[in-house]
Amino acid sequence: MLDFTFTEEQQKVIDLCKELAKDFRTRAAEHDRDRTAPDENYEILKEKGLYGISIPKEYGGFGIGFQGYAAAAVELAKGCASTANSFNMHANACGTILSQPLVSESAKKMVADLAINQGKLFSVSTSEPASSSLIITSFIPSVQAVKVDGGYRIYGKKAFCSMIESSDYVFLYAHPEEDPNPEAAVGLLVPVDKGNAEGVTIHDVWDTHGMRATRSNTVEYDGTFVPDELALYKTEDFLNDFIMRSANWTIASFASVYLGIGMGILEYTTELLTAKNAKGFSQPQAFHPDSRRRVGEMAAELHAAYWSNMYAAWYSDTHGPTLEAFHNFMRAKHMIASAVSNASRSAQIACGAHGMFKNLHLERMVRDAATAPIMPPTIDACADQVGLLTMGLNPADTAPPLKAEEPKKEKVTQ
């Protein structure tokens, strides 16, 4: 039986995020302009107990499931998309770790304690400079984890590391040195101390079109030490763990943020058109048939995407990380990317010049929405996977989609 009614606990968190978004919105333009981290927003989220938003109740968290989180993320993104997208890294890390069966109970309790009781902020780093959001096999980690006494030392670069400068720890995957299996990976909780840890160098490259306050810079690790207790688990099947088992957090959580941007664009457009009167007319511009049509199309597509996302979240909470759950998330992500892109274009046309000024919220939201179709997996990658699964084909039979690089031959010295 399908039941999308939110529980009392879920609704409380959703309403709280809706209220916080109003405050975050007042500072969003400043952080966007200066591309500064919204650290005060992260502090507020901590004060409100939201560092436990993706942690099950048995570990001391809110216990609202992925469905509750997805709805809450939509509300946060309406206020400040950069805050929502960055904080999603924390939820992503906690949600992934706490739901991973390969992580020990003691490690799960440690992570929950760090987040809830000690107020530690986590981020996630999966992408590397050579990763492609169109080719999922390129996410197999090349960062090396070298075993040493008492732990690991890691070497290499991670890219698009949102919120890293504000975080205490980063959850990442590295390849164990000398392991012949290319998909072998160790999940590490790396103490980065807001980018100040030994062997951590942050390259400030994040001067972008949108999502400017996420501070998604490139991070280089040169012998950064990770103690054994923070080596959470090892997998021999990285892609399955990363994509299938954790699809709710690694894919759908980001999709929920972008859905929130689209819903925010719809709300802003509605507010502007219902308040704007053209000279010589008593009715607001919302009554114009072109305005009605554009808002109607936006609302229809975005609400369809919202409920597709809610169904996928509900199914995941109910049935776990199944192939059908993955299929649902792929469909929802594709719908969200398409609906948000279309809403951005229609809102700009419907609002006219009033949507172009930087002192108004629409211009920023449109720029933040620009990455909705390319946030992994891209809209094309989603369509590809949906097509494969709809026809009952095995996605593994199509990977990799491009010709593999030839192994480099070692030079022979005379």
Image (cartoon, rainbow, N blue to C red):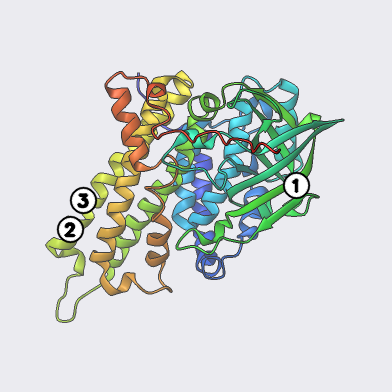
Q: Please tell me the numbered disc located at residue 222.
A: 1
The 10 Å Cα crowd at callout 2, few under 14, some 14 to 19, many 20 or more, is some
For discs 3 and 2, the disc positioned in front in the rendered view: 3
Residue 92 picture quarter? top right
Residue 369, label in figure: none
Q: Which residue is mark 3?
A: 297
Q: Secondary structure at mark 1?
A: strand
Dot 2 or dot 1: first in sequence order is 1
Q: Amino acid at mark 1?
A: Asp
| Point 14% across, 81% down: residue | 280
Residue 400 percent location from the top left of the image: 43, 30
Q: Which residue is mark 2?
A: 292
| Residue 169, above or below 361 | above
Say which residue appears at 22% left-offset and 74% top-offset.
277
* Residue 274 seen by the camera: no
Question: What is the quadrant of the N terminus in the image?
Answer: top left
Instruction: Point out the tag, 3 or 2, that comes first from the N-terminus.
Output: 2
Q: Residue furthest left?
A: 289
User: Residue flagged by tag 3: what amino acid is it?
Assistant: Glu
**Residues at badges 1 and 3 in contact (C-beta under 8 Å)?**
no
Q: CA distance from mark 1 to mark 3?
A: 51 Å
In front of the other: 302 or 149: 149
- Cα distance between the residues tagged 2 and 1: 56 Å
Q: Looking at the image, which is closer to me, 376 or 99? A: 376
Gap between marks 3 and 2 measured at Cα? 9 Å
